[in-house]
Amino acid sequence: MYSWLLPYREQLPSDRRVWPQALLLAGSANLGGLALAEHCAAFLLCHHPAESSACGQCQSCTWFQAGHHPDLLRISKEPDEKVIKIDVIRDKIARLSKTAHSEAAQVVLIYPAENLNKAAANALLKSLEEPKAGVYFFLVADHHASLPKTVLSRCQIIRLKASNALAEKENDDTVDAWLEDCIAVALAQQNALAVAQKWASLLKEKELCAILYLMQDLARYQLTRQHTFAVYEARKNQIEQLAARFSLAKSVALCQSLSTLYAETIQGLNLNFQLSLECRLLDFAG
Ligand SMILES: [Zn+2]
């Protein structure tokens, strides 16, 4: 789990007997809400939990790590659907009535929760209103404001903030060096392919996240022409330089392509990272 999520974990109990039955983790996609939910789910399901995390070794943890824990019900929209429909909720909730496989806990993880359509949210609401003992709901939402108030009111809400993620990044020389190289490519001071080669094996999630945040700050600045940076206030001058070089459409397109690269990378779906990185950096240069 990312270290910037630890303060959020500390807001939650280490005694499972007092764990909230419905928890909403709200915050934009790259802030780690899903990672935090999974960390907590593993803890609730673990047979021999340590102080505030799963042991990583018991049968439950083995199932969890293998990605098929019988008592972890993941709910998201079907690949060919735009929303999470009521049938999906009914089907999964019906499974909760059956006996749990490991000890007593069962976890329902819904992501992104704002994909619940109205009927599905209402079906879920029933379970949130009368939660069964040992059943824990995690709703992870990038845009939680679109969820019905009735659902929100049943959840303990934790809001993830970009500033916490940033606090860690700002003290990170690697992230700084990487951002400097990206900016140098955009300003035609460095060669895109050389930078891609240098970084292909060094980049981790936080570096990818950092460049995405920088581009989001850039797009925000281009839209509003105001210095309301969510993350990179300290790079105000560089953001102004980039704004003179990129059109808004290009900044938005770069945000999208970096976001895709980030998602593919954390899910292990990117088969040729260096090539993908070269393409992005060439976009920066071009
Ligand atoms: Zn365990």
Image (cartoon, grey):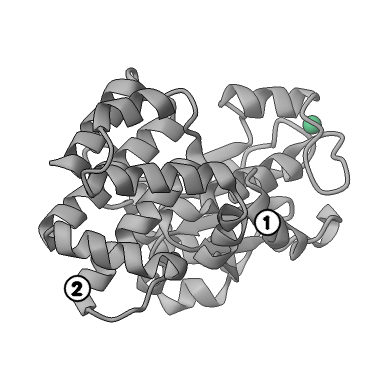
Q: Nearer the viewer, residue 258 or 118?
A: 258
Residue corresponding to mark 2: 223
The residue type indicated by label 2 comes to: Leu
Q: Position of residue 143 (x, y in %)?
A: 38, 65
Q: Position of residue 222 (x, y in %)?
A: 20, 70
Q: Nearer the viewer, residue 154 or 209?
A: 209
Question: In the displayed structure, does residue 108 sit left or right of residue 254?
Answer: right
- Residue at the spot 73% in from the left edge and 55% down from the top edge: 133
Q: Secondary structure at mark 1?
A: loop
The residue type indicated by label 1 comes to: Lys
Residue corresponding to mark 1: 132
Q: Position of residue 15 (x, y in %)?
A: 86, 56
Question: In the displayed structure, does residue 22 sit left or right of residue 284?
Answer: right
Question: In the displayed structure, does residue 153 sit left or right of residue 103?
Answer: left
- Residue at the spot 46% in from the left edge and 34% down from the top edge: 266
Quadrant the N terminus occupies: top right
Rendered position, 102 above or below 122: above
- Circle 1 residues within 10 Å: few <14, some 14–19, many ≥20: few
The answer to which quarter of the image holds residue 42 is: top right
Rendered position, 274 above or below 134: above
Q: Secondary structure at mark 2?
A: helix
Is any atom of residue 92 visible in this view? Answer: no
